[in-house]
Image: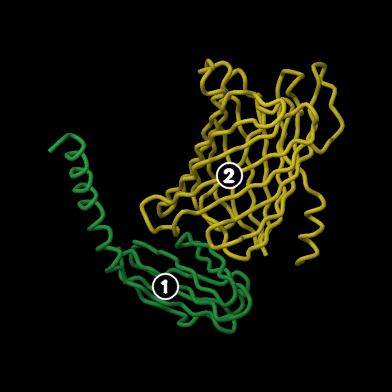
Chain colours: A green, B yellow
């Protein structure tokens, strides 16, 4: 096997060693859906595992945009009307983390409980 | 406070370009984009302090409107008004100097990987007859920890069109902030302008600036207030810069 062939197989092997665990982790990541309807989050409270990265799907079913914001979780992202976004949260320690919709603060409130 | 404000703001456009141009210090950009459909009005400025008449009191004012094209692509149009002193310290009248089209692209979701990353591309059109246009690219990197956020911009720029210098210039910008509260995030910034890359300019011709910063969000307005101390001979002794952004 020539030098070029050896480099190819070494690179491929390293790539597999790196990406298989990454993809495996992504495949097993907990996923939760938060729906925005009539300027409220549903559910208003979700429970996620501590010290674990999770995937939130924010599904805005209203026509108006909303901004998913949480200072404690360091997340701030606008969800356009009739649109979905993905927000990754964690890993975070056990506790209670507030979030809100900055465009409709009076009604768009919620809590992520981490246990 | 909706579309009418956006239209009015667009008519007030101003862009950054001190005389000489190398004095300009930009903001440190996060790779995180606001979101699809977001509209933004931005005002920013800078003011230089220096014992050299040619740099003292030089100022810029920049006005922009921005729009979230997709969840990952944000585009802005800037215009600039600038005033600069001559060799005797006599200030020029404010003049419109540049129009800029700026684009940020977020490569993946925030927190998806160990580091957040994005790309920045800007074209600056000069409205001064003896100035070149400018093309600028940046790699935007950010790492968020429970209480701290660190942001780095790796910068490359090149003059283009008439009067353009041949060489490419490079720089680095860094920001660290402590997330004390939503409205107050103290931190610092560090800016380096290496000058023309191939010329390997000596230290005394490069620009190094560092200083305290205050960031935050009050209601729907993001603000930044920074004071940079010049720590190399070519830098102004001091520079105050500020930034206000309203999203809606």
Is B18 left or right of B207, judged from the image as shown?
right
Q: Quadrant of residue B73?
A: bottom right
Quarter of the picture containing the N terminus of chain B is bottom right
Q: Chain of mark 1?
A: A
As drawn, B112 above or below B177:
below
Point out which mark residue A112 bears.
1
Q: Residue at x 80, y 24 (%)?
A: B85
Instruction: Give the image location of residue B179, x and y in percent.
Output: 50, 52
Between B242 and A115, the residue placed more toward the observer is B242
Which residue lies most toward the bottom here? A38
Query: Do the numbered discs 1 and 2 sit on residues whose CB atoms are within 8 Å?
Result: no
Instruction: Give the image location of residue A36, x and y in percent.
Output: 53, 79
- Crowding at dot 1, Cα within 10 Å, few <14 / some 14-19 / many 20+, comes out as some
Q: Residue at x 61, y 77 (%)?
A: A106
Q: Residue at x 63, y 66 (%)?
A: B37
Between A64 and B73, the residue placed more toward the observer is B73
Q: Which residue is mark 2?
A: B121
| Marks 1 and 2 share the same chain | no
As drawn, B18 above or below A67:
above
Q: Secondary structure at mark 2?
A: strand
């Amino acid at each position: 096997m020539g030098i070029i062939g050896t480099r190819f197989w070494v690179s491929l092997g390293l790539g597999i060693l790196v990406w298989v665990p990454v993809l495996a982790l992504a495949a097993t990541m907990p996923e939760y859906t938060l729906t925005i309807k009539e300027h409220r989050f549903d559910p208003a409270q979700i429970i996620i595992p501590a010290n674990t990265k999770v995937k939130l799907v924010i599904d805005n079913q209203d026509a108006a945009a909303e901004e998913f914001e949480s200072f404690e979780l360091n997340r701030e992202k606008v969800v356009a009307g009739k649109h979905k976004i993905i927000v990754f949260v964690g890993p975070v320690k056990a506790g209670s983390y507030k979030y809100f919709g900055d465009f409709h603060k009076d009604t768009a409130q919620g809590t992520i409980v981490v246990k | 406070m909706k579309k009418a404000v956006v239209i009015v703001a667009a008519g007030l456009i101003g862009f950054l370009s001190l005389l000489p141009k190398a004095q300009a210090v930009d903001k440190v950009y996060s790779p995180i984009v606001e979101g699809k459909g977001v509209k933004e009005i931005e005002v920013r400025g800078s003011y230089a302090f220096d014992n050299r008449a040619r740099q003292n009191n030089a100022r810029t004012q920049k006005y922009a409107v921005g729009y979230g094209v997709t969840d990952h692509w944000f585009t802005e149009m800037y215009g600039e008004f600038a005033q600069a002193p001559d060799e005797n310290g006599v200030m020029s009248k404010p003049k419109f100097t540049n129009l800029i089209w700026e684009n940020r692209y977020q490569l993946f979701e925030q927190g998806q990987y160990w580091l957040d990353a994005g790309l920045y591309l800007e074209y600056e059109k000069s409205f001064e007859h003896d100035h070149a246009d400018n093309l600028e690219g940046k790699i935007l990197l950010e790492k968020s920890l429970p209480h701290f956020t660190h942001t780095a911009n790796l910068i490359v720029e090149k003059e283009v069109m008439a009067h353009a210098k041949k060489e490419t210039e490079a720089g680095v910008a860094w920001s660290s902030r402590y997330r004390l509260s939503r409205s107050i995030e103290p931190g610092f910034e560090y800016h380096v302008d290496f000058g023309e890359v191939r010329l390997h300019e000596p230290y005394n011709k490069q620009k190094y600036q560092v200083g305290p910063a205050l960031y935050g969000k009050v209601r729907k307005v993001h603000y930044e207030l920074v004071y940079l101390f010049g720590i190399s001979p070519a830098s102004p002794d001091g520079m105050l810069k500020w930034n206000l952004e309203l999203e809606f």
